[in-house]
């Protein structure tokens, strides 16, 4: 009897190891408002460093910024790391259009270095069909979605009907194909009750839709986390002294803010290395009509938020950002 129990336990352990190993590297979609700030580009660079380390697989980059510069800019960032063909999704109903001048300046300076044929169109298509296809083609519960911009694309994915891509609705696809959503949005601790966080403010309706009905667990990185992740530009100068043409760094130089808050980098770092962070209790996030948000503790609740960082935690996380960003690009093509 004891032998049989032991055998069953062994089978369970082997099966669970096989299941978790099946999706390592982790398969992610990166949904971003890239072009509004420079931390999105640094976060995408951090993702590429983790791809080179065998930790991540990037299935698509989808943008909620409708700027015509975005597809070329994202292709350039991906191309620097030798992956210019990663699919890029563009919003079909823009909440915002931001032609960050740093995108144009970086493209002018570096596109030809990063992309074999800059005159060829970037691999861009509408975001919602792209998201539906990526999910439909993925094994069950194998995709983690990272959101570091507005909720526009994800709300429209959630409400998408069955179509020729999949007989499942968007909500059914998310429930079946994804394991988690990790978002930078809202605030859960140290802001006034009437504070409306940026990623919610520009598309409150979409953020409410996602908060109300997203069918899998959600981890929320509130505004208070990135506010503690302050990275001086001169620290980037030292990191990229050997490669001053790294596109996301060049964009930071054009952006010109002497100390940047790196909100968006915490999301991919959490996806792969959650031990850098502590989570609050399970519960439910709601977003009110005015864009303010609330967290209600709830047993087995869908949502968790990242607890405010101690000085020691923010130091360790900034060190991790530094060593990941300073990793030489191991290009797929090489
Ligand atoms: Ca962002």
Image (cartoon, helix red, strand yellow):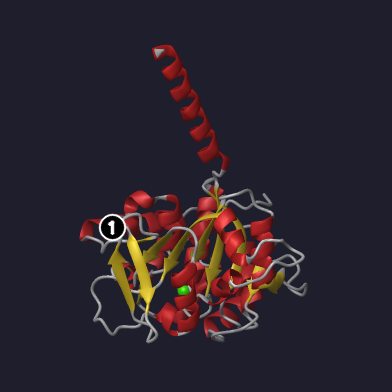
Please indicate whether residue 280 sits to the left or right of residue 151 in the image: left
Please indicate whether residue 241 sits to the left or right of residue 310 in the image: right
Tell me residue 161's x, y (percent). Answer: 67, 70
Location of the N terminus (image quadrant): top left
**Does the image show residue 36?**
yes
Q: Could you tell me which residue is drawn at 60 percent across and 61 percent down?
A: 172
Q: Nearer the viewer, residue 141 or 314?
A: 141
Mark 1 Cβ inside 8 Å of ligand 1: no
Q: Nearer the viewer, residue 159 or 69?
A: 159
Q: Nearer the viewer, residue 212 or 126?
A: 212
Q: How many marks?
A: 1
Tell me residue 47's x, y (percent). Answer: 51, 58
Please indicate whether residue 223 sits to the left or right of residue 62 in the image: left
**Does the image show residue 232?**
no
Q: Could you tell me which residue is drawn at 57 percent across and 60 percent down?
A: 174
- State which quadrant residue 123 falls in: bottom right
Q: Nearer the viewer, residue 46 or 284?
A: 284
* Residue at the disc numbered 1: 281
- State which quadrant residue 289 falls in: bottom left
Q: Is residue 313 shown above or below 33?
A: above
Q: Could you tell me which residue is drawn at 26 percent across and 64 percent down?
A: 308
Q: Is residue 5 shown above or below 85?
A: above
Tell me residue 37's x, y (percent). Answer: 46, 78
């Amino acid at each position: 009897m004891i032998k049989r129990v032991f055998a069953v336990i062994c089978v369970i352990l082997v099966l669970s190891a096989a299941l978790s190993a099946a999706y390592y590297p982790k398969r992610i979609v990166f949904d971003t408002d890239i072009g509004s700030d420079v931390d999105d580009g640094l976060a995408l660079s951090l993702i590429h460093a983790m791809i080179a380390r065998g930790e991540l697989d990037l299935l698509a980059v989808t943008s909620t910024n409708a700027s015509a510069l975005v597809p070329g800019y994202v292709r350039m960032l991906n191309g620097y790391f030798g992956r210019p063909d990663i699919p890029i999704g563009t919003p079909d109903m823009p909440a915002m259009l931001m032609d960050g001048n740093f995108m144009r300046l970086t493209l002018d300076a570096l596109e030809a270095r990063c992309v074999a044929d800059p005159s060829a169109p970037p691999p861009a298509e509408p975001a919602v069909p792209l998201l539906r296809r990526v999910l439909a083609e993925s094994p069950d519960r194998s995709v983690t979605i990272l959101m570091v911009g507005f909720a526009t694309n994800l709300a429209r994915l959630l409400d998408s009907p069955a179509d020729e891509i999949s007989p499942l609705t968007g909500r059914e696809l998310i429930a079946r194909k994804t394991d988690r959503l990790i978002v930078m949005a809202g605030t859960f601790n140290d802001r006034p009750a009437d504070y409306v966080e940026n990623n919610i403010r520009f598309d409150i309706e979409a953020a409410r839709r996602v908060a109300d009905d997203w069918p899998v667990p959600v981890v929320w990185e509130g505004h208070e986390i990135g506010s503690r992740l302050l990275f001086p530009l001169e620290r980037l100068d030292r990191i990229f002294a050997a490669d001053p043409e790294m596109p996301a760094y060049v964009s930071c130089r054009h952006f010109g803010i002497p100390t940047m808050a790196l909100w968006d980098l915490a999301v991919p770092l959490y996806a792969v290395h959650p031990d850098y962070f502590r989570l609050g209790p399970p519960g439910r996030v709601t977003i009110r009509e005015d864009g303010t948000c609330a967290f209600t503790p709830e047993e087995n609740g869908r949502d968790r938020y990242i607890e405010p960082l101690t000085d020691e935690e923010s130091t360790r996380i900034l060190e991790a950002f530094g060593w990941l960003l300073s990793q030489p690009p191991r290009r797929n093509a090489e």
